[in-house]
Image (tube, helix red, strand yellow):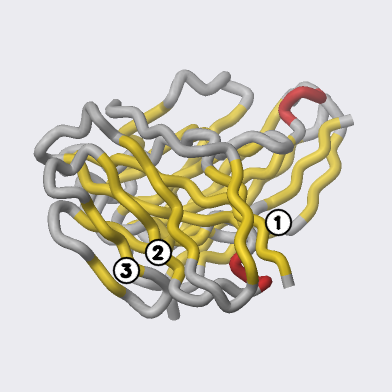
Amino acid sequence: DTEVTQTPKHLVMGMTNKKSLKCEQHMGHRAMYWYKQKAKKPPELMFVYSYEKLSINESVPSRFSPECPNSSLLNLHLHALQPEDSALYLCASSQHPLAGEYEQFFGPGTRLTVL
Amino acid sequence: DAKTTQPNSMESNEEEPVHLPCNHSTISGTDYIHWYRQLPSQGPEYVIHGLTSNVNNRMASLAIAEDRKSSTLILHRATLRDAAVYYCILITGANSKLTFGKGITLSVRP
């Protein structure tokens, strides 16, 4: 199984809502990542988890709260988002967190719309 | 992070080879050269990566210049499905952060 799955595929939420994005991989990878991609722009790294611990936070606002409950699962909790947070949220994983010799596997993304 | 430079776009014909260039003149000795592509409405997909030697896999070949200041992704026979944005990214051995540039948009003509 070389797949990263993400749920939901699409999400529409209001600015006062609380929602969560879910990402799962069963490849035994020890690094997991969240990226944000605005329309017609390249993906931008948000968070890196290394062995289930947050190792990189790219100065992301606190209304985005990541969580890694176990080595296969990564969540992104959303609260009090703004319309400009509407984007494609991508999850990825790789075998080892601090090694350029390993590729990253991406999920299909969650398309988020904030009203 | 070391930077890469790619043309904005390239066109090719179906079933012909495609050579996608990437310049990375500030590459360091521990930087790996990664290529990813992103088809419309999909997440990025790993294509190939290498350090110093040329690499081949089922999707493509990666030709790395001897001084490592440039590389070329080679698609041997382009198909319509290869139309995508291709990203050339440098990753150091001590940090697996992917910093995406603008990439090159490949169009494939039938």
Give the chain letter at badge 1: B
**Mark 1 vs mark 2: same chain?**
yes
Q: Which of marks 1 and 2 is nearer the N terminus?
A: 1
Q: The N terminus of chain A lies in which quarter of the figure? A: bottom left
* Crowding near the residue tagged with mark 2, few <14, some 14–19, many ≥20 C-alpha atoms within 10 Å: some
Determine the image quadrant of residue B68.
Answer: top left
Give the chain letter at badge 2: B
Residue placed under numbered mark 1 in the picture: B40
Determine the image quadrant of residue B49.
Answer: bottom left
**Mark 2 vs mark 3: same chain?**
no
Say which element carries label 3.
loop
Give the chain letter at badge 3: A
Residue placed under numbered mark 2 in the picture: B74
Q: Which of B95 and A62 is in front in this view?
A: B95
Residue placed under numbered mark 3 in the picture: A28
Which amino acid does the dot numbered 2 rest on?
Ile
Q: Nearer the viewer, mark 1 or mark 2?
A: 2
Write the residue at 22% across / 38% down.
Answer: B69
Query: Which percent across, then down, holds residue A110?
Result: 69, 51
Q: Which of marks 2 and 3 is in front?
A: 2
- Seen in the picture, residue B16 relative to A11 is either above or below; the reply is below
Judged left or right of residue B17, residue A88 is right
Q: Which of B17 and A20 is in front in this view?
A: B17
Say which element carries label 2.
strand
Query: Which percent across, then down, holds residue B11?
Result: 63, 55
